[in-house]
Amino acid sequence: MTMNQQLKQGNYITQAWLVILLALLYGSALAGVHVGLSDRIEHNKRNEIYSQIPNLVPDAVQEKTQEKTVQGLDGKTTIVYQACDAKGQCIGWVLRGSGQGFADRIELLVGIDPTLSSITGMYVLDQKETPGLGNYITDPERFQNQFATKKIDPPLVVVKSDPDPQHEILAITGATISSESVSDTVNKTIANLKQPILDLNR
Amino acid sequence: MAASEPTALERFINGILPENPVFRQLLGMCPVLAVTNGMKPAMTMAAATASVLICANIIISLIRGFLKPHLRILVFTLTIATFVTITDRFLAAYVYTMSKQLGPYVPLIIVNCLIISRCEICASKQRVSVAIADAVGMSIGYALPLACIATVRELLGSGTWFGCPVLAESWWPRWGIMVLPPGGFLVLGILLATSEWYTHRRAARAGM
């Protein structure tokens, strides 16, 4: 190594030592925060799912819920929630699904009956749709409640007026794309997990 | 040069009105427009920005003697990004619903020019006590316009304040536009015009 190169290397460290030191310190601080808080954050998410189970499957008791791991038709392993009543009897399933919305991914939960023939509820977990239009997909009265009466087969269709009570979803005015994204995601989630769940019961 | 630098008190007062970040410097416009459709998200955003600004100012002021001119922006960004990530995790852990509602706007505090400008203008040149006073002043100066805009938008758009019903729906039709992005632009524009008009009028009176 020549004298010149050594000088240059020394120079590099004198220039950048603060950046390197800070990067190390900040990195460990972030790691510490992550270790300290990640359990709590995960817990918050789980709580939100569990708190919705009684709304998605009528008469379900939060504490009796069982988590089952299934492999969807898309090959991915997913957790599904088996909703049970106070006696521990299985009275339905809660599935978690996600799909592209108008602005960003929409994450939702679907409740279905134990025979997997009809939907018992729908809840949007996470969305970034247009405030005042698309974000009404999170509104129970305006949108979410209508899913509770629908049949699974054939898949849901979005219409702009006079929805059929069993197969059609009434779109939110001014937010047809958001409405369609939600009903598509519901259809896909059910199609993906229906057979694996039926196989579980065997 | 050192003698002409503002004192802690001057820094503090400057941030609130004379050099108000929103009305005078027009910094940090993204959250001003995006999260002011309600008081709760607006105040959470103001608190998150304040915590990042105060922490970043303290650290930069402590290490100001070691800063190399050509590496300083890198150090500022590194510091700000770290505190923003920490703030984001804390929000997700302790105010989960609010963190969900703010979505990407909390990580976006990293690119809020208000913070890096305070590191550059004050914290990298002055001692810690002045840097803290500056950060607190600027934080208040940032929270006030957010509160103004959010109050107007939430009252007119949803009839509530901090989520509590104020205007009954029976006699106050909801102005949907106030909750939507155009409402943010409208209210900000009107407030900016008012503050300009007031400043000019005061200057004109002082001139007479």
Image (tube, rainbow, N blue to C red):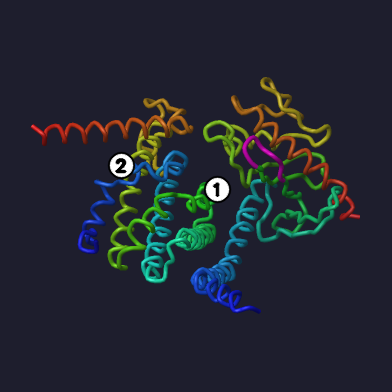
In the rendered structure, which amino acid carries the disc numbered 2?
Answer: Arg
Read off the chain for label 1: B
| Residue A103, magenta (yes or no) | yes
Secondary structure beneath label 1: helix
- Residue B104 has which mark? 1
Asked whether, in this view, residue B113 is left or right of residue A192, the answer is: left
In the rendered structure, which amino acid carries the disc numbered 1?
Answer: Pro
Q: In the rendered view of the protein, which quadrant contains the N terminus of chain A?
A: bottom right
Q: Is residue B57 above or below residue A111?
A: below
- Foreground disc of the pair 1, 2: 2
**Quarter of the view holding residue B152:** top left
Q: Residue at x 44, y 66 (%)?
A: B68
Q: Is residue A72 above or below residue B186?
A: below
Residue range (magenta)? A98-104
- Residue A181 has which mark? none
Q: Position of residue B192 (x, y in %)?
A: 32, 34
- Residue B24 has which mark? 2
Q: Nearer the viewer, residue B155 or A163?
A: B155
**Cα separation between marks 1 and 2:** 26 Å
Q: Is residue A35 visible?
A: yes
Q: Position of residue B60 (x, y in %)?
A: 40, 65
Q: Residue furthest left?
A: B208
**Quarter of the view holding residue A8:** bottom right
Q: Position of residue A33 (x, y in %)?
A: 54, 68
| Residue B164, magenta (yes or no) | no
Neighbour class for label 1 at 10 Å: few (<14), some, many (≥20)? few
